[in-house]
Image (cartoon, helix red, strand yellow):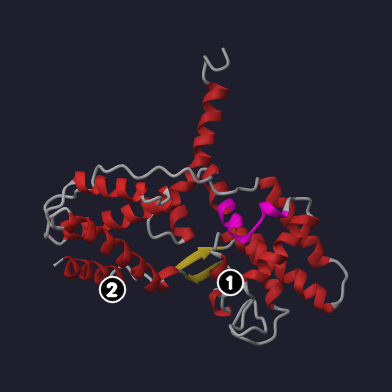
Amino acid sequence: MSSHLIGAFLEMMSAERGAAKNTIDAYRRDLSDYAGYVAGRQQTLLAVGRETVNAYLDRLRLDGLSASSSARRLSAIRQFHRFLCADGMRSDDPTRIVASPKSRRALPKVLSIAEVDKLLTTAEAEANAEASPQKQAAALRLYVLLELLYATGLRVSELVSLRRSAVMRDTSYLTVTGKGNKERVVPLNDRARDAIKTYVATLEAGPFLFPATGAEGYLSRQVFARDLKSLAGRAGISASRVAPHVLRHAFASHLLAGGADLRVVQMLLGHADISTTQIYTHVLDEKLRTLVETHHPLAGG
């Protein structure tokens, strides 16, 4: 019975939400483990109570599972029980007021706006400097990658594999295929638009925006990450603080600090669930604390 219910849930995740195969496999593993625990307590998935869900999370903690891994398991269990309720197989959700395991993991590394500006300025200067054709092409490519990454917050895998057809006619937008083959449209700012126009004019014919000679036909993530760290050193920023995903974090954090709506940022990042985007709200917490400390009549009194 439990395998039938889990199978129905996974089918829905695949068909309706376009979940990727490795996501489905992870859900299957997590839910099978949970179902085994529930059965061991002589209960069924259609009747299991909140105390059993909490006991399962306790067992994971005793087994040494990290808080972030336990939270991922709970997320799968929550979605599964919501599915059972939505389909009328259960009238209640036993996970509704179960607290998520608190993770002690560090918040995403974030560069300041000034540091990102220093990276971009250094990359732009190198792209415009006199050099051999090969060096100049590499410098221009790195500058465009950086402008695009900070302008759009793309995942590095989405960025390096961009097709030329993703750049819409007036280069105001990119069409991006993200996780689960979901397509989203991302706007470009003026700097990124100008950089792309200049760069595309230097390319030979081919399907990819960042072509390379490897098997996939486009620039590898590792090469981009290496070039970015090297650039950071030349810009006077510690290479250990800079990586492609750090620029994605900077994009989201700087937008939120500037007053952008969390759901807009969720859409731009391509997050299926807003809870993933909420990790960036530490920026807002910081901003609110500063606001209170600066403006509260009793602050510093």
- State the SS at label 1: loop
Q: Is residue 161 magenta?
A: no
User: Which mark's residue is nearer the viewer, 2 or 1?
Assistant: 2
Say which quadrant the N terminus sits in.
Answer: bottom left
Q: Which mark is residue 170?
A: 1
Type of amino acid under label 2: Ala
Quarter assignment of residue 266: bottom left
Q: Is residue 162 left or right of residue 124?
A: left
Residue 93 percent coordinates (x, y): 18, 50
Residue 283 percent coordinates (x, y): 53, 41
Front residue of this view, candidates 188 and 32: 32
Label 2 crowd bin: few (<14), some (14–19), many (20+), radius 10 Å: few
Front residue of this view, candidates 119 and 191: 119
Quarter assignment of residue 144: bottom right
**Can residue 122 be seen in the rendering of this structure?**
yes
Q: Is residue 259 left or right of residue 194?
A: left
In the displayed structure, would residue 220 be above or below residue 252? Answer: below
In the displayed structure, would residue 140 be above or below residue 39? Answer: below
**In this picture, which residue range is highlighted in magenta?**
239-250
Q: Is residue 241 magenta?
A: yes
In the displayed structure, would residue 172 be above or below residue 74? Answer: below
- Residue at left 50%, top 32%? 288
Q: Is residue 167 left or right of residue 37?
A: right
Front residue of this view, candidates 207 and 222: 222
Front residue of this view, candidates 67 and 132: 67
Q: Which mark is residue 15?
A: 2
Secondary structure mostly seen in magenta is helix
Type of amino acid under label 1: Asp
- State the SS at label 2: helix
CA distance for labels 2 and 1: 34 Å
Say which quadrant the C terminus sits in.
Answer: top right
Residue 114 percent coordinates (x, y): 70, 46
